[in-house]
Structure formats: structure tokens, C-alpha cells
């Protein structure tokens, strides 16, 4: 599925919560265009501003799901968000893309293993008493074992995803 001969890439991530979310989305979409991709950013969807909050949420969810269904691949920002783990909405979107057999290219800055990132005791348990997995992966195994590959930045991710898709 392509648009104007270019693969469509859903741009997943907590970037929609940035103060400059619209401008950042335009930046990511321009990078996609420069590499022969069409970037699909969640704010491309229009939602009426005067709807009740729960109705707005449902419309945003449905529109983003439709974008994921209609994309060829996903670029996912899996940097930590409000803690040490990726954004839960982004994790859902990655899972959906994987279930639909869409390639996912992740990006995040800290490439150390989870054991290196999360404080734990000698037995591998964190301050809350939960074991920190030790699979030598930089993210939870359900993410790390299902993405096509990863990069440290969005810029590198877009460039390498374009090459990856060109080779399919």
C-alpha cells in the first residue's frame, strides 16, 4: 500500500504531547518526504474542538487506528515517557502494527540493556520488588523481539527505515 508511489509510515510516539507537537510533526513528515516516504502523523486527523472529552478521545483513537491499518510501516519513538518505560499508547500502536504484519522501526537514545538502565538489587529486583528482566535488550522483550530494527534518533530511523522498505 503506497501513496503516490511512496510508502506510508505512521509516526508513533509521545511527540503529540510536546508543546511544539504540530511543528515537530511537520519536521518528521518533511524528513520522511526527503527520504521518499509519506509520514502519517496523528495530528493529521481533524477532530472538532467542541466535543465532550470522552467523544474526542474515541475519535482520536479510531482515527489513529485507521492510520495504522492504512500505513505500510511504523516509526515508533520508544524513548522513556513519564518514567523509565515507553509511552503506553505508543506501545499499543506498536503491538497493533506487529499484529497487522507491518514492519516497525523503533528509535530511542538509551541503548543500554534494561538491567543497565533500571536500578535493581543484587538479585535483579527494582525498588518496588519487581524483577528487572535480563535478556540483554534495551526495551521489554515484547517490543525488542518484534521491531524490524532500531536507531538512536528519529532522523536516523527515518533514513534507515526508508532503505529497509526499499529493500523489501
Image (spheres, rainbow, N blue to C red):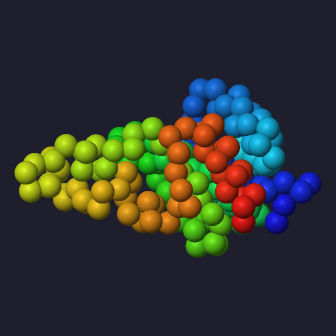
Residue 76 in sight in this render? yes
Residue 54 in sight in this render? no
What residue is rendered at 80% in x and 41% in y? 33
What residue is rendered at 57% in x and 68% in y? 98
Residue furthest left in the image:
122
Q: Is residue 134 left or right of residue 6?
A: left
Residue 134 percent across, percent down from the top left: 24, 59
Q: Is residue 23 above or below residue 121?
A: above
Q: Is residue 110 left or right of residue 28?
A: left
Residue 55: quadrant of the picture: bottom right
Residue 122 percent across, percent down from the top left: 7, 51
Instruction: Locate the C terminus by quadrant.
Output: bottom right
Residue furthest right in the image:
4
Q: Is residue 1 left or right of residue 134?
A: right
Residue 142: quadrant of the picture: bottom left
Q: Total marks drawn?
A: 0
Residue 51 percent across, percent down from the top left: 71, 46
What residue is rendered at 66% in x and 51% in y? 161
Amino acid at each position: 500500500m503506497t501513496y503516490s508511489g511512496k510508502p506510508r509510515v505512521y509516526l508513533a510516539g509521545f511527540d503529540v504531547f510536546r508543546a511544539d507537537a504540530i511543528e515537530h510533526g511537520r519536521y518528521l513528515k518533511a524528513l520522511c518526504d526527503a527520504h521518499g516516504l509519506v509520514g502519517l502523523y496523528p495530528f493529521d486527523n481533524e477532530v472538532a474542538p467542541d466535543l465532550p472529552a470522552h467523544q474526542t478521545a474515541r475519535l482520536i483513537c479510531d482515527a489513529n487506528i485507521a492510520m495504522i491499518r492504512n500505513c505500510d510501516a511504523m516509526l515508533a519513538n520508544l524513548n522513556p515517557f513519564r518514567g523509565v518505560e515507553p509511552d503506553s499508547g505508543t506501545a499499543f500502536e506498536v503491538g497493533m502494527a506487529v499484529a497487522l504484519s507491518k514492519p516497525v522501526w523503533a528509535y530511542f537514545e538509551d541503548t543500554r540493556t534494561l538491567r543497565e538502565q533500571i536500578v535493581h538489587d543484587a538479585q535483579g529486583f527494582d525498588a518496588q520488588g519487581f524483577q528487572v528482566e535480563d535478556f540483554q535488550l534495551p526495551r521489554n522483550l515484547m517490543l525488542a523481539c518484534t521491531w524490524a530494527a532500531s536507531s538512536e534518533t528519529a532522523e536516523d530511523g527515518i533514513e534507515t527505515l526508508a532503505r529497509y522498505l526499499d529493500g523489501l
